[in-house]
Amino acid sequence: MKRRTAYRFFKRLFDILSTGLALIILSPLFVIAAVGILISDPGPIFYLANRAGKDNKTFRMFKFRSMRVDRNANEKSLRPDQDRIFPFGRFIRKTKIDELPQLLNVFFGDMAVVGPRPASVDQIPITRSGANAVVASVKPGLTSPSALYDYLYGDTIEDEAEYMEKVAPTRLALDRYYIGKQTAGCDLKMIWYTVVCIFGSVFHKPAVFILRELIEAVDGDRRALDEMK
């Protein structure tokens, strides 16, 4: 119990210090992203989404807008409408720049640097029910095993039905897996793996070894590895 309490204390301290420093250092990138969005598709710079946080309490999550505005968009889907993503939006998604505003969510305590993927309020029946109800016991994070799995493999599948069949089961299993593996070492490993995955994507060298490790962790569907080769 004391070890778990200490872990939570130092995790929160790390979240505050790291995101505070990151917000200062990355402020020029925020400006560049804002200008790029306005040039690409005039409208709001930020996308504000209702997300389920710890204990399924709703909070407003910040992201740089990467899609054309659609007030009738379906948030129940686990997949974004690919046709609405503008070119600069694809770039900031690929490099994870679109998620930088979530540093504010971490700083203010709605999220953590490492934690399960934030779930849309409309997705709670899919992502936070049954065996996955335990996922709501911690704050959602910027990165996690499921986020990396989605980045490496899920983002390559645009069809929603195919995504639900091939990706969603392992993605949800990885959220449960993280709950049982929470340690400072695991969190630092996820942060490092995130850096490796981003650079691998930018230079067109997917980190297949990370994908393999994630799949083997939950004994998931190995089709993902075959399709990455």
Image: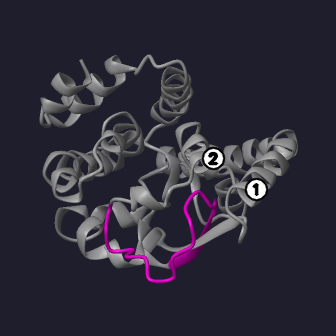
Mark 2 Cα-neighbour bin, 10 Å: few <14, some 14–19, many ≥20: some
Magenta residue check for 72: yes
| Tag 2 residue | 88
Q: Which residue is drawn at 38% across and 39% down?
A: 145
Q: In which quarter of the view is residue 213 placed?
A: top left
User: Is 111 positioned to the left or the right of 217 in the image?
Assistant: right
Residue at point 52%, 22% (across, down): 196
On screen, residue 69 versus residue 132, left or right, reads right
Type of amino acid under label 2? Phe
Query: Is residue 186 placed above or below 132 in the rendered structure?
Result: above
The image shows residue 185, relative to residue 20, as above or below, that is above
Give SS at disc 2: helix
Amino acid type, mark 1? Ile
Q: Where is residue 6 in the image (x, y as percent from the top left)?
A: 57, 46
| Magenta segment boundaries in residue numbering | 58-78
The mark tally for this picture is: 2
Disc 1 designates what residue?
Answer: 39
Could you say which is closer to the camera, residue 19 or residue 17? 19
Disc 1 on helix, strand or loop? helix
Residue at figure coordinates x 57%, y 27% from the top left: 195
Q: Are marks 1 and 2 in contact (CB under 8 Å)?
A: yes
